[in-house]
Amino acid sequence: MKFMVIVKANAASEAGVMPSEKLIAAMQDFNEEMVKAGILLAGEGLHPSSKGARIRIQGERRTVIDGPFAETKELVAGFWLLDVGSREEVIEWMKKCPSPHEDGEGELEIRQLYGPEDFGPELTPELRAQMARMEAQVAAR
C-alpha cells in the first residue's frame, strides 16, 4: 500500500526560513531509518507558496494564479511517499517523526494513494496495459 505523508506548512516555512543543522540531521536520520526499512519511495521539502502557482481549470479555460497563497496551515511544506503494509504501519512510522518545524509544532497528514485495483471495471485491460507501460518508463529513468 502506498501512502503520501504531507507535512503542513507554518509561518516560518512559508517565509522560506531554512531548518537548522540539528533539524536537518534529525530528519536525515529519520529518512535513513525508512530507507533501511525499505519503505521510503520519495521525500522532499517544498519552496514556499510565494514561488508557486496554481492553475484553475474551468471547462476549457485555464487561469494561472501566482503565489503566495492564504491559509498557511492548509499549505504543504514537504512530503514523503511510502510503501508500507497498512495504514497502521505508516501511522506508527510517523509517530516517530521529528517535529518538522523549529518551533516543535507540526502536523502531518496521511493519505493513501489509489492503486489499479481501486478503479474497478472502468480501468479496462487496455488502460491497465497503458498504465503498466508508463510505470515501466518512469521506473527506467
Image (cartoon, rainbow, N blue to C red):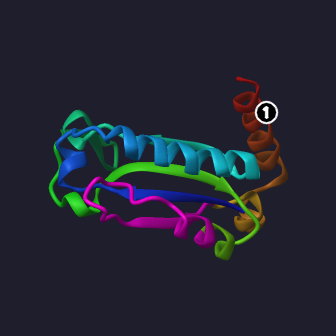
Q: Which residue is mark 1?
A: 136
Q: Quadrant of the N terminus?
A: bottom right
Q: Which residues are magenta?
A: 91-113
Determine the residue positioned at 31% across, 62% down: 104
Verify whether residue 104 appears in magenta: yes
Q: Nearer the viewer, residue 30 or 72?
A: 30
Q: What residue occupies the far front of the structure in this picture?
A: 22
Residue 50 location, quadrant = top left
Verify whether residue 116 appears in magenta: no
Q: Is residue 91 above or below residue 38?
A: below
Give the left or right position of residue 22, taking residue 38 as reference.
left
The amino acid type of the residue labelled 1 equals: Ala
Q: Can residue 62 be seen at all in this image of the molecule?
A: no
Give the left or right position of residue 55, taking residue 4 as reference.
left
Q: Nearer the viewer, residue 42 or 135?
A: 42
Q: Can residue 97 be seen at all in this image of the molecule?
A: yes
| Secondary element at image label 1 | helix
Number of dots carrying numbers: 1
Q: Nearer the viewer, residue 35 or 121?
A: 35
Q: Is residue 110 above or below residue 24?
A: below
Q: Nearer the viewer, residue 141 or 37?
A: 37
